[in-house]
Amino acid sequence: MELSASASALVEAGPVAAGNAGNAGNTGAATAAEAATGMGEEISRFMRQINAMRQRMRDDPGVGDRLLLGRLVLGGPRRATDLAADTFLDLSTVSRQIRCLVDSGLVRRTPDPDDRRGALLSATAAGVTAYQHFRDQRNEHLARIFDAWPPEDRHQLVRLFGRFNDDFAENYHRLSAGQAGATPPAAAAAAQQGEHA
């Protein structure tokens, strides 16, 4: 997948000096506040680049539905309410996108065996194929980015980004439940290990 001119411009306009500083200090340490500032800036930069790519792909009728389709392919059949919770989307958005996926033949509805009044959503064979095609394109693009990285850096990014995603999702659910301020268990365990190191 090649970036559009607008996406490339955003990538090239990123904070090169900050990136170089990050490379120079990759063996250092940061406080939680420092990490929050740096990570917040990098997430904002990353989202600008993602949004630029979405602009390029606006004419692709399936771009807005891939998240839901991916959850059904990877997670198996589920109800619309569960799908909304999995993807952090409101039910009306999920219902609208699911209608498009059903009309496109990528998702099917079947009666829920636990509640005949409801329906289970599942990916069709065509839906699985469409998702795999998108996943292959995405992985090919990411592999080109990682090609020049040392193997250890690739491994550490995947490991730490996975941990960040886990804690971010956990904190989101805690905030939704009105329990803001608590430290996610994974982060608390890591901090405790650091204290005893």
Image (cartoon, grey):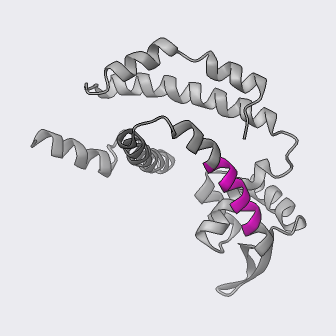
At horizontal 80% and vertical 34% (from top left) the residue drawn is: 56
Q: Residue at x 38, y 21 (%)?
A: 22
Magenta region, main secondary structure: helix
Tell me what residue is drawn at x 71 percent, y 61 percent: 131
Residue 4 vs residue 45: left or right? right
Q: Is residue 50 visible?
A: yes
Which quadrant of the figure has residue 71? bottom right
x, y percentage for residue 121?
A: 73, 72
Identify the image quadrant of residue 183. Answer: top left
Q: Position of residue 24 (x, y in %)?
A: 33, 19
Direction left: furthest residue: 196
Q: Which residues are magenta?
A: 128-139
Q: Is residue 24 above or below residue 155?
A: above
Q: Looking at the image, is 67 positioned above or below residue 150?
A: below
Residue 168, given in percent of the width and then of the height, sits at: 45, 44
Q: Quadrant of residue 67?
A: bottom right
The residue drawn where x is 66% and y is 75% is 77
Front one among 145 and 157:
145
Question: Along the horizontal axis of the image, is 20 left or right of 61?
Answer: left
Looking at the image, can residue 90 be seen?
Answer: no
